[in-house]
Amino acid sequence: MNATLRNTSRLTFAALRALLVLSLITGVLYPLVVTGVAQGAFPDQANGSVVELDGREVGSSLVGQTWNDEDGNPDPRWFQPRPSAADYDAEASGASNLAADSPELLELVRERRARVAAFNGVPESEVPVDAVTASGSGLDPHISPRYARLQADRVARARDLDGAAVRTLVDDAVRSRVAGFLGEPRVNVLQLNLDLAELDR
Amino acid sequence: MSPVLADLLQVSALIAALALVHRPFGDHMAAVYRSTRHLRVERWTYRAIGVNPDAEQRWPAYLRGVLAFSAVSVLFLYLVQRVQDRLPLSLGFQPISPDQAFNTAASFTSNTNWQSYSGESAMGHLVQTGGLAVQNFLSAAVGMAVAVALVRGFARSRTGELGNFWADLVRGTVRILLPVATLAAIVLVAAGAVQNLSDHHAVTSVTGVTQHLPSGAVASQEAIKDLGTNGGGVFNANSAHPFENPNALTNLLEIFLLTVIPFSLPRTFGSLVGDVRQGRAVVAAMAVIWLTGVVLVTVLEFQHPGAAAQAAGGAMEGKEVRFGEGGSSLFAVSTTMTSTGAVNSFHSSFSGLSGGVLLLGMMLGEVAPGGVGSGLYGMLVMAVIAVFVAGLMVGRTPEYLGKKIRAREIKLAACSVLITPTLVLVGTALAVALPTPPDSARNPGPHGFSEILYAYTSASNNNGSAFAGLNADTDWYNTTLGLAMLLGRFLPMVFVLALAGSLAEQRPVPATAGTLQTTKPLFTQLLVGAVLVVAGLTFFPALALGPLAEGL
C-alpha cells in the first residue's frame, strides 16, 4: 500500500514537472517568439490592420462596422454592411445559429429583403443573399459586388454625386477570388466608404 | 469563373497539397518516434521531469503516464481559470465559474475544445496562451503518443514494451508540433491574423461609434489550434472571425493544417510496421469517407434546401462572404471528420441534411481522417474489427499485420468502439428526458433535438464544434458534457493501450495463402464498410429524429 502511494505521488510529481516545463516552452517561449517576429516583421497586421482617415484611427480593414445615422438607422450616405447577429460589436462576435428552415429566420429574411429593397429603391428580386443573411462572425467586413453595386445609386442620390462616379468607385473596390479560385469576389465596406469620403470631399 | 469550378479547384488544391506533403511528413514523424537520439532541449526536459526517456514501458506504465499527465493538466487548467483575476495580462476579466472552468479544463485537456465561454469577453491573455494553448500542443502530443504506442504493438513481438510515454510526449511536441506551428503562425500574421499582448484597441469609426478591436496572441494559438486538431479559438466566432482567419488563402491553409497530421500518420504507421502499403490502404479508407462528406455537404449547401435559405436565395446565414458556400463546406467537413471542431461558418445554419452529414462525420468515431493520433488509433481499432468480420465470413482466425485477433483483442477493440456511442446516446437521452435541459435549445422541433444530439456527439468524440444555438453554459451541460469529454477521450485510450500491449506480446504468425491481404483495395472497402455499419446501426434512430426529420 505504502509503495503504491509512493509510486503514485512520484508519478504525479513527474507529471506536474513535465506540464510546467512544457508550458514554459509552448505557453511562454512559443507565443513570445511568434509575437516578437510578428511585431518586428508585420506590425500593421499583428496589431489589427488599423485604418486611418486624416490621421485618425477609424477601424480595422478586417472587421466590419455599422454605418448608421445618429438615430441608429442605416445612413443612406454610406454603403451598408451585411446584417449582423452581433450588431458589429467587436467584443461579442457570433452568429444567429438559426436553422436553414427556421420560421424565425424565414421571417427575418423577408423583413430584411423588404427593407433593403425599399431603402435602395430597387425591386425585392434584386436583393442578393448576403444582404439578407447574417455572417458567422457577426463582423464580416465584406459584401458581395452585387450588393455594393445595388447600393451605388442610392449613395449617389443621398450625397448628390454623379451616379457613374460612384459606380466606378464600386467597380474599383471589387476584389476577385484569391489566386483566381479561392474564396469569393467581395467588396470591403470600410475601404469603399473611405474611398467614397475621399471622392465627396 | 463559376463558383462551382472555383470550388472544385479549391478542393483539388487541398488534395494535391496533402498528397505532396503526407509522404515526407509521415516519414519525418516515423523518424521522430523511432529516433534513439535526444535533442538538447529534450534532455533538459527529461532531467527536469526526472525520467529516463530510454526506459521502455509496458502498457500499464504507459497508460499511467498518460492518465497522470492528463489529470494534472485538468487540475492546473482549472486553477488557472479560477484565479485569473490575480494573474497578469488578465484584461480585467473575472475568474471563470467552477462549472465552466471544469468544463473548459476537461475540454482542452481531452483535445475537444468545446467552448461554453466567449473568448474575447472571458479569458485573459495568460489563460489563453499559458493555459489553453499549452493544452492545444500537449493534448495533441498525447494523442499521437497513444497512436504510436498502438503501432508499436503491431510492429513489435514477444516483448509487451511500447516505448516511453514521456519521450513520445516531448518529441511529438518539440519535433513535430512546435516547428510547424511556428511557421504557420508567422504566415497567418503576415496575412492579417493579430498577434499582440496589448489591451483591446479602441477606435472611433467615421460615424462616431467607438469600437473595441480585440487583441491577443491569436496567430500563435490559431496555428496550433488547427495543427493539433483542437479547435478552441481565441474568439467566440472562432475561425469565422477575421482576426483568426482573415482571407480565403488563410482559410485553405487552416484546412490544410487541420488535416495534414491525420492524413500523414497512416504513412508513419506504414513506415513503422515496415510496409508503407499498409498505411496506404488505411489512408485510402479515410480519404474516401472524407471526400464523400465534402461532396455531399458542398452540393447541399450550393442547393441550399430549407425554407429560410430558399427565401434568402442561398445558404449564407452564418457564413462569411470571403469564404462563400464552398470554402465553408470544405472547412465544416474537415473540422468534423478530424476531431478539430474549429468553425469558419456556423453549422447550426447549414441545411438540415448537411448538418446530418457533419453529425455523422463525428459519429463515425472521427476516423476519417480523425484527430491527431486519435484518428489513426481509432481507424486501426476499426481495422481489427474489419479483419475479424472478414475472418468470420471465411471461418478463419483473423490476423492483422501478422498478429492474431483473438478473443482478448476483439473484446478490447469492441469496448473501445462502444464507449462514445454509449456516452452520446445516454447523454442525449438524459438531456431530452429531464425537465430543464431541453430549454437550452435555440431552435424549435427536430433542429432543437439536433442541437442537443450534436452537443453530446461533439463532446464524446472530442470534436468541439457545436450547433451553437444551444445555450450550453448551464450547470447541467457544463458538467455532463465535461464528463463526456473526459470519458470519451481517456476510456478508449485504456482499451487501445491494453490492445497494444496484448499485440506486442504475441509472436508473429507467418502470412499464408489464406491470410486476408490488408494492403489491397478490397481491404480498404471492408474498412470503410466496417466504419459505416458500426456507426450507422448505432446512430440511425437518433439521426432519424433530428437531421433526417428536418431535412426530408
Image (cartoon, rainbow, N blue to C red):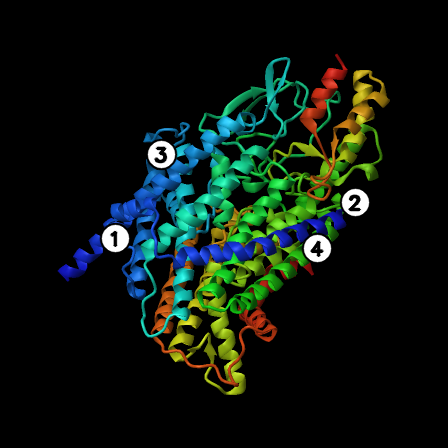
Tell me whether the residue at label 3 lies in contact with that at label 2, contact meaning CB atoms closer than 8 angstroms. no
Mark 4 residue element: helix
Upstream in sequence: badge 3 or badge 4 = 3
Task: Provide the chain ID for the residue under circle 1.
Answer: B
Judge by depth and name the residue closer to the eye, B77 or A184: A184
- Which residue carries the number 2 mark? B1
- Residue B123 image position (x, y, % from top left): 43, 35
Residue at mark 3 shares a chain with residue at mark 2: yes
Task: Measure the C-alpha gap from mark 1 to mark 2.
Answer: 59 Å
Upstream in sequence: badge 3 or badge 2 = 2
What amino acid type should be assigned to the residue bearing mark 3?
Gln
Q: How many marks?
A: 4
Task: Measure the C-alpha gap from mark 1 to mark 3.
Answer: 31 Å
Query: Is A154 displayed left or right of A188 in the figure?
Result: right
Task: Measure the C-alpha gap from mark 3 to mark 2.
Answer: 50 Å
Task: Measure the C-alpha gap from mark 3 to mark 4.
Answer: 44 Å
Query: Is B246 displayed left or right of B478 in the figure?
Result: right
- Which residue carries the number 4 mark? B300
